[in-house]
Amino acid sequence: MGLWTEILDLLFPPRCAFCRKLLRRGESGMCAGCEVDLPYTKGGGKQKGDFVNLCVSPLYYEGNVREALLRYKFKGATANAVVFGRLLADCAREHLAGEYDLISWVPLSGRRLRERGYDQAMLLAMAVALELDDVAVEVLKKNADVAPQSETGGAEKRRANISGAYETADPELIAGKRILLIDDIVTTGSTFSECARTLGLSGADSVVCAAVARSRD
């Protein structure tokens, strides 16, 4: 550990991404308690959806997981991407091995990106790719600034809200490829489905997805 890192740790002690307790020496990203007690899904929390072969998630979207993701998504806690990416990579390694050729993410619209200052799904995809000794590449652009899915309502309204919102960034890149899409949260799955539909229309062979957390059935 370098001197500068030690100084930063003294001034801003690292905290658990989930419960916010100070981390002890040897802990990285999350404390030993959360590592044991987080609401882990069983069997990768597998889901299927329209145009999506399989979606996996290591955690349920509740309690400290929900609070941690909200801090990450809306309050600039971008360092959480590292521990989230590690959890996602472990889940993908166990349940999606051999199912994809490219790693990418569900993009923000240009306006939302300017407001937030960062694309949380892109950071996650990069963290996942790093853990998997791979790279993340852009395959989609969001060409419509629609209302946030969390404010839209039920599954039907969410599907309608997101319809036609994405376009393929480079059709030649994805032609015949199997894509792994990364996002932070999956609830109804309508966003993943619309992204997968768009990729399929542009020539992708198949789409699998992974999110840090999912809602319970």
Image (cartoon, grey):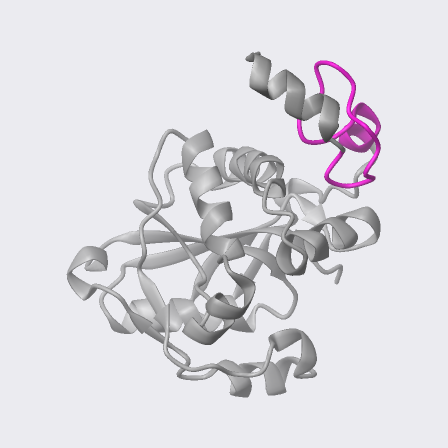
**x%, y% of residue 144?**
42, 82
Where is 142 relative to 215, above or below?
below
Asked whether residue 180 appears in the rendered view, the answer is: yes
Residue 97 in which image quadrant:
top left
Above or below: residue 145 compared with residue 68? below
Residue displayed at 54% across by 85% down? 161
Residue 181 inside the magenta-drawn segment: no
Residue, far left? 172
Residue 116 position, x and y percent, is 55, 64
The image quadrant that residue 156 belongs to is bottom right
For the image, the number of numbered tags is 0
Quadrant location, the N terminus: top right
When the figure is inspected, residue 117 is found, relative to residue 68, above or below; the finding is below
Q: Is residue 20 magenta?
A: yes
Which residue is more in the foreground, 154 or 73? Answer: 73
What is the quadrant of the C terminus in the image?
bottom right
* Magenta residues, start to end: 16-36
Task: Provide residue 27's location: percent of width, then percent of height.
Answer: 71, 20
When asked about the image quadrant of residue 88, the answer is top right
Residue 182 at least partly seen: no
Residue that appears at 53% across and 88% down: 160
Taking the spot 45% from the left edge, 84% from the top edge, the residue there is 163
* Dominant secondary-structure state across the stretch colored magenta: loop
At a point 45% along the width and 62% down the height, the residue shown is 106
In the image: residue 80, left or right of residue 143: right
User: Is residue 138 shown left or right of residue 203?
Assistant: right
x and y percentages locating residue 28 in the rendered image: 67, 24
Foreground of the two, 56 or 121: 121
